[in-house]
Amino acid sequence: MINEQKVRELVGQLKDPFLHKMLAETGGITQVSIKEEKKHVSVKVAIAKVNTAEQMALQTQVVEILKQAGAESVGIRFEELSKETLEQFRGKATESEAQDLLSPLNDVEFISIASGKGGVGKSTVSVNLAVALARLGKKVGLIDADIYGFSVPDMMGVTELPIIRNDRIIPVERLGVKVISMGFFVEDNAPVVWRGPMLGKALDQFFRDVEWGDLDFLFLDLPPGTGDVALDIHQMIPTSKEIVVTTPHPTAAFVAARAGAMALQTDHALLGVIENMSWFESKATGEREFVFGQGGGVKLAEELRTELLGQIPLGQPDWNEEDFAPSVYAVDHPIGQIYMDIAKNIVKKTVK
């Protein structure tokens, strides 16, 4: 029967599937126990990212190598490497590793915009926050991950299409934001009738096959609710901060709580809640009318134990024919200023 030293030697030669370094180098073998009478070996392994297909492949390798060495049964538990360890290897990352958005070595800040239901203005919030951060001088990307209800290109007034260069998709840049959307890849606003695996492949392409360049923030406009596509994205990206959008109506806030709960269950941090359509302010009288009720955003933030980042009133952006973007508020528009304040808060909350 093999001993602990031999186990560490054999398993240590295998590579962390994300860091591409041997487990002996990363300190990835955190615990070994052996039951000689049963010829059973238990190993606890730390890698850069757990609950992935890459983890399953590594698990198979560990079992094979230990059984070849004489173990009759093998038990494996996985955990994630500490943030401090990942930071050490982030500095040693190759150019290709650093540019892989899904690699734990990439330090882009993912911000997912979620909602419990459609029609609460989630995409409007996504677009305006991305533009606001770009106005602050940040390098920003935006993935329209609402596969069935893509709307970002129209909201931002995008008229171009991405181009392919050296087998890489070059995103469209608009108002300082690099944009990719399913809307670029369907004809004449056709409905998307793909099933789960096809959608997952498309989303993977948005991460891996798009030439994003150097980004500070990547926004993800998630599908509403807690369906398969939203869950796939939560599991796909290494880490993400999440903002939940609701209206003031208590029912909308109740439904939105499920989206926030999904973020917490998939180990993603909540940045806060944005209440959209909070009120309508009359230009004639200056009085506020609470068209959709009051209190939903505050209640949701309290329930999720997070911050209410802001309240966005009902209002129409100012359009002009020269720079047409029908859902983007100008920097000097009162609502544009609210988005700018929220963007500044996001920078403070995510600064490393």
Image (tube, rainbow, N blue to C red):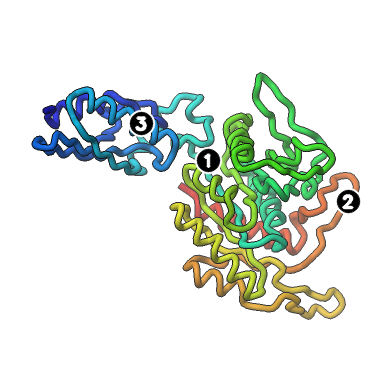
Q: Is residue 31 above or below residue 166?
A: below
Mark 1 residue element: loop
Residue 344 horizontal/vertical position (percent): 59, 55
Name the residue tied to disc 3: 58
Residue 205 visible somewhere in the drawing: yes
The three-letter amino acid code for the residue at tag 3 is: Leu
The three-letter amino acid code for the residue at tag 2 is: Asn
Give the residue at x 78% y 80%.
Answer: 287
Residue 159 in the figure: left or right of residue 309: right
Q: Quadrant of residue 233?
A: top right
The mark total stands at 3
Q: Is residue 144 above or below residue 345?
A: above
Distance between the Cα atoms at labels 1 and 2? 33 Å
Q: In this view, does 89 lie above or below 279?
A: above
Q: Please identify the quadrant where the N terminus is shown.
A: top left
Of badges 1 and 2, nearer the viewer stands: 1
Observer-nearest of 215 and 253: 253
Give the residue at x 57% y 56%.
Answer: 226
Distance between the Cα atoms at labels 3 and 1? 26 Å
Name the residue tied to disc 2: 320
Which circle marks residue 108 in the picture? 1
